[in-house]
Amino acid sequence: MRRIVALALMIVLVAGVSFAQGNSEKTATTSAKTLRVAMECGYAPYNWTQTDDSNGAVPIVGSKDYAYGYDVMMAKLIAEKLGYELQIVKLDWDSLVPAVQSGSVDCVIAGQSITTPRLEMVDFTTPYYYASIVSLTTKDSKYASAKGLSDLSGGTCTSQLGTIWYDTCLPQIKDAKILPAQESAPAMLVALNSKRVDYICTDMPTAQAAIVAYPNMRILDFSSTDDDFQVSQEEINIGVSVSKKTPELTKAINGVLATLTVADFNAMMDEAISVQPLSNN
């Protein structure tokens, strides 16, 4: 009888250990299914840093702060649809592509244009936003009434480092005095607000967010004229960059983006602009 009881006890113990191991493996598998998304967390309305989780902001890895904005909204949607836990990784602009290449993050959702040079280093999804190019100046500037690029001739200007705004667009302005590129979008806005430059070049969402933070600024949109910045579609299409080693992830994200329309993108961007904290610019 004792042998029978002992044997039964052993079976229960073994079953318990097996169950615990199974649960442990499931937990490990679940926790490993994380989508690590990199962004600057300082580029409103695409992404910014805030001190709490208001509006659905997501914690930044290794920080007490939270990230929110259009890119975070998009990252949350993608992660939810694909069944991933989301992690937001805060990196400098120049570190974003290398982070994808090294595998330290799974993708970058940070307002990146789908340019040919970037495509040589990483893969991109289909666009998750289409951003037209504009200029920003102050309302009291002599360039405030500019109707086209020719009216910006001779002005002092700058933009963000490593962007088509600085590398491609500003050189198209005749006799422009182009100052060194700024390390971030907020920095270029500060340069304009402090009148170190006459105008800057950026995209429409960034400009729309800027005039909320800086009511003294004015958007110069020449898109309805023949005297506008000349850019290719790839330079205004914004995509998610993914490692060339993970084509399955690119395909999965594309599947999610295919369920959205341009109207959906614009509605999300309008929401991001409406809740951006003024302190980010």
Image (tube, rainbow, N blue to C red):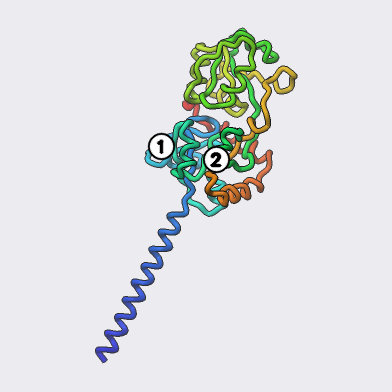
Q: Is residue 124 visible?
A: yes
Other-residue count near label 2 (Cα within 10 Å), few / some / many at <14 / 14–19 / ≥20: many
Q: Amino acid at mark 1?
A: Asp
Q: Residue 96: horizontal and vertical position, in percent?
A: 48, 36
Give the quadrant of residue 263.
Answer: top right
- Which residue shows up at 37% across the image and 72% down it? 18
**How far apart are the alpha carbons under marks 2 and 1?**
29 Å
Q: Name the residue carrying label 2.
A: 122
Q: Residue 188: horizontal and vertical position, in percent?
A: 51, 20
Q: Nearer the viewer, mark 2 or mark 1?
A: 2
Q: Is 5 placed above or below 126 here?
A: below
Q: Is residue 49 visible?
A: no
Other-residue count near label 1 (Cα within 10 Å), few / some / many at <14 / 14–19 / ≥20: some
Q: Is residue 13 left or right of residue 210?
A: left
Secondary structure beneath label 2: loop
Which comes sooner in the sequence, label 2 or label 1? 1
Which of the labelled discs sits on residue 65, or is there none? 1
Q: Is 41 placed above or below 243 here?
A: above
The quadrant of the rendering that contains the N terminus is bottom left
- Which residue shows up at 43% across the image and 63% down it? 26
Q: Is residue 226 left or right of residue 257?
A: right
Q: Residue 67: horizontal and vertical position, in percent?
A: 47, 37
Q: Nearer the viewer, residue 162 or 221?
A: 162
Q: Amino acid at mark 2?
A: Val
